[in-house]
């Protein structure tokens, strides 16, 4: 029997029971739609995490003090004072894979302007900060290396600080604010970056020259962390190795001793979060996949009913020359037609659902073409798999018995 | 005269559990081209088994069956299907039309299983078959829109569409009233006059008298075989039956 005739016969058989065909397809429609939507949500959250981490600077390699052992006692990392400003200079001169580096010191306190005050963090950085952290100055200017060298009391404000000290949309450049009673001249405003992956406001900060914060505000000799930027995102691992060697040498750490610092790069962070959201995607997909499976069982059920119901038709078809294989193909075509039609409707419904979820819940949803192709392929497999047994049953009927079936 | 059906020492056993049922116990039978044979017998006499074997739906346990020069014993299931498709036409007691499918599509059905026939030819032949049973005006009607007699005529058209060497009818008038039965028999006689060979199973003696020859089965063997002398002309019979007023 030709494919055209097969399709015609299958179509006619399904159209004889429109409601039943639709209800059977509904299982597949819902299954496919939920697979598409769930994978979309999973992919969307993965992508948004990736974008946010990339926004923090994909080339970023961070050095923080590590825990240290003295006389068998482990000391907490945050209390350590092992990193020095000179380490930054060593890293810059000895690590070819590092493009830029800045020491960082930070202190929390109350910023005051006139009658208004706001609790925030003061970050001391050098002039490479903007480049390393992928930020820019929106209004005003960055501090210069002269100001850095002379520990000038100048600062740049984040948008949140501007809003709380000066009011929305005000221009603070040229004004003087106080942080821990020390006056700072505002020379610029940083661009807005919004919340980071962890929900922290990246605009709630005051940026000042490193020297000013370290010596005039905090009065310390060490630095709290070092941020470096690798020459490109592929070189972060290389940069990490070079920095480790350099800092170990500068810190005179013996080969048998552990590092007194920890190096992190964003690729690691990215892969951690990616694997988390991959698990999420798999989990959501699996739950949706189960509903697809249930839909498939629904097809199998209806095909069995259909075979029983149409026993005499099968007998007749065999009597007038239909081979067992023709009958098998006929029922298989019906189940595949059901599952594929359901699958196509489900794909469109899933895309629509993803759009609705994305827009109403402001949840990032990305429907990849690959998940559409996957769903379609799964539907075809379901049609064949769940249609096979009923079709086999039909094909193995004896025409004489089938013709007499009541 | 050409032998279309030749049956030699044919036996058929069924195994029901441990009991063997001898449905046919050695039958010799010949049907020549152009004959109209009625097979009669009580239930259990083996006439249905005989028709199943003649219709290539079943294979003999012993003996030989030669249909149009082809011995069927050696054929596979698929070859038997193809043989049924090319050489046989079936008419059943319960019509066995596809529900919710119009007359034309029902008649086309046997040709669907013949890949050598294109859709245009299929349609033409189905139309011709419907015309020969006088149902051209009903070709787009579905079975539930047709009377019993009309449904059986569609079934006969279906059995004609592949131009079979033999038409096999199993109690084809069993579900019909007397008048409609004779209408159907008149159609069979007309087809027979045009040269179609027909093998007809019935238990009604009057209907059997429309045929040219009767074969009576009993207990799995042929009891009697006779050429019909006072053959009924179904058309004349029809004229004598009053049309019932509804």
Image (cartoon, coloured by chain):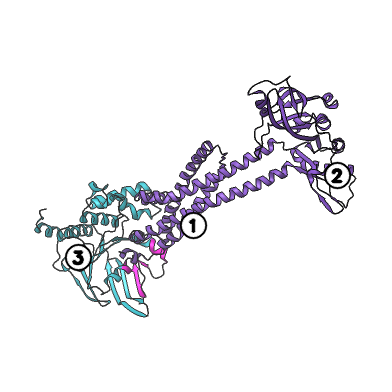
Chain colours: A purple, B cyan
Separation (CA) of disc 3 from disc 2: 109 Å
| Count of marks placed on residues | 3
**Residue highlighted by disc 1:** A385
Residue A384 pos. (x, y %): 48, 55
Decide: few, some or many residues near mark 3? Use Cα within 10 Å; few <14, some 14-19, many ≥20: many
Separation (CA) of disc 1 from disc 3: 51 Å
- The residue mark sitting in front, 3 or 2, is 2
Report whether residue A112 is seen.
yes
Residue A47 pos. (x, y %): 62, 40
Residue A318 lies in the magenta stretch = no
Residue B53 lies in the magenta stretch = yes
Above or below for B196 versus A121: below
**Residue highlighted by disc 3:** B211
Question: On the rendered structure, is A157 left or right of B214?
Answer: right
> Tag 2's secondary structure?
helix
> In front: A376, or B222?
A376
Q: Are marks 1 and 3 in contact (CB under 8 Å)?
A: no
**Residue highlighted by disc 2:** A245
Residue B38 pos. (x, y %): 22, 67
Above or below for A370 versus A169: below
Q: Which residues are magenta?
A: B52-81
């Amino acid at each position: 029997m030709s494919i055209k005739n097969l399709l015609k016969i299958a179509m006619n058989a399904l159209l004889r029971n429109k409601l039943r065909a639709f209800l059977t397809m509904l299982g597949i429609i819902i299954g496919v739609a939920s697979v598409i939507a769930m994978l979309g949500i999973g992919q969307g959250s993965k992508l948004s995490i990736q974008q946010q981490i990339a926004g923090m600077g994909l080339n970023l390699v961070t050095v923080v003090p590590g825990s240290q052992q003295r006389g068998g006692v482990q000391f907490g990392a945050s209390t350590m004072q092992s990193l020095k400003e000179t380490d930054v200079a060593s890293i810059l001169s000895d690590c070819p894979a590092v493009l830029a580096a800045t020491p960082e010191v930070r202190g929390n306190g109350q910023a005051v302007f006139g009658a208004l005050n706001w609790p925030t963090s003061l970050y001391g950085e050098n002039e490479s900060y903007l480049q390393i952290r992928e930020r820019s100055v929106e209004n005003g200017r960055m501090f210069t290396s002269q100001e850095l060298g002379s520990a000038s009391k100048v600062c740049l404000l984040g948008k949140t600080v501007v809003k709380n000290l000066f009011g929305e949309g005000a221009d603070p450049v040229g004004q003087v604010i106080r942080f821990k009673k020390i006056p700072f001249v505002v020379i610029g405003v940083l661009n807005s970056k919004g919340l980071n992956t962890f929900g922290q406001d990246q605009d709630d900060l005051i940026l000042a020259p490193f020297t000013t914060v370290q010596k005039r505000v905090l009065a310390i000799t060490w630095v709290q962390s070092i941020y470096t930027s690798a020459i490109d995102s592929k070189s972060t691992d290389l940069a990490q190795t070079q920095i480790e060697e350099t800092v170990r040498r500068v810190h005179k750490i013996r080969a048998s001793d552990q590092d007194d610092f920890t190096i992190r790069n964003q690729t690691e962070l990215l892969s951690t979060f990616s694997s988390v959201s991959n698990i999420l995607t798999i989990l959501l997909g699996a739950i949706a996949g189960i509903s697809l499976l249930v839909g498939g069982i629904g097809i199998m059920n209806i095909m069995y009913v259909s075979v029983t119901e149409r026993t005499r038709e099968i007998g007749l078809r065999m009597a007038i020359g239909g081979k067992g294989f023709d009958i098998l193909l006929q029922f298989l075509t019906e189940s595949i037609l059901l599952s594929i039609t359901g699958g196509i409707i489900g794909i469109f419904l899933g895309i629509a659902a993803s759009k609705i979820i994305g827009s109403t819940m402001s949840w990032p949803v990305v429907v990849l073409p690959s998940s559409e192709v996957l769903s379609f392929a799964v539907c075809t497999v379901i049609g064949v798999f769940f249609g096979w047994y009923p079709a086999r049953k039909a094909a193995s009927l004896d025409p004489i018995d089938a013709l007499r079936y009541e | 005269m050409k032998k279309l059906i030749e049956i030699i020492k044919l036996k058929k056993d069924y195994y029901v559990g441990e009991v063997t049922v001898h449905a046919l116990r050695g039958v010799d039978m010949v049907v020549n081209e152009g004959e109209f044979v009625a097979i009669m017998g009580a239930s259990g006499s083996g006439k249905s088994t005989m028709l199943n074997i003649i219709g290539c739906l079943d294979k003999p346990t012993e003996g030989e069956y030669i249909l149009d020069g082809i011995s069927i014993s050696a054929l596979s299931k698929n070859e038997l299907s193809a043989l049924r498709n090319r050489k046989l036409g079936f008419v059943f007691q319960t019509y066995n039309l596809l529900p919710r499918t119009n007359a034309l599509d029902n008649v086309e059905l046997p040709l669907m299983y013949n890949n050598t026939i294109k859709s245009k030819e299929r349609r033409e032949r189905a139309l011709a078959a419907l015309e020969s049973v006088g149902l051209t005006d009903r070709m787009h009607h579905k079975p539930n829109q047709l009377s019993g007699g009309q449904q059986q005529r569609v079934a006969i058209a279906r059995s004609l569409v592949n131009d079979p060497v033999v038409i096999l009818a199993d109690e084809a008038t069993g579900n019909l009233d007397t008048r409609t039965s004779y209408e159907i028999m008149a159609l069979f006689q007309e087809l027979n006059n045009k040269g179609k060979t027909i093998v007809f199973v019935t238990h009604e003696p009057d209907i059997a008298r429309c045929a040219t020859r009767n074969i009576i089965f009993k207990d799995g063997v042929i009891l009697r075989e006779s050429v019909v002398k006072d053959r009924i002309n179904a058309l004349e019979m029809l004229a004598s039956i009053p049309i019932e007023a509804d």
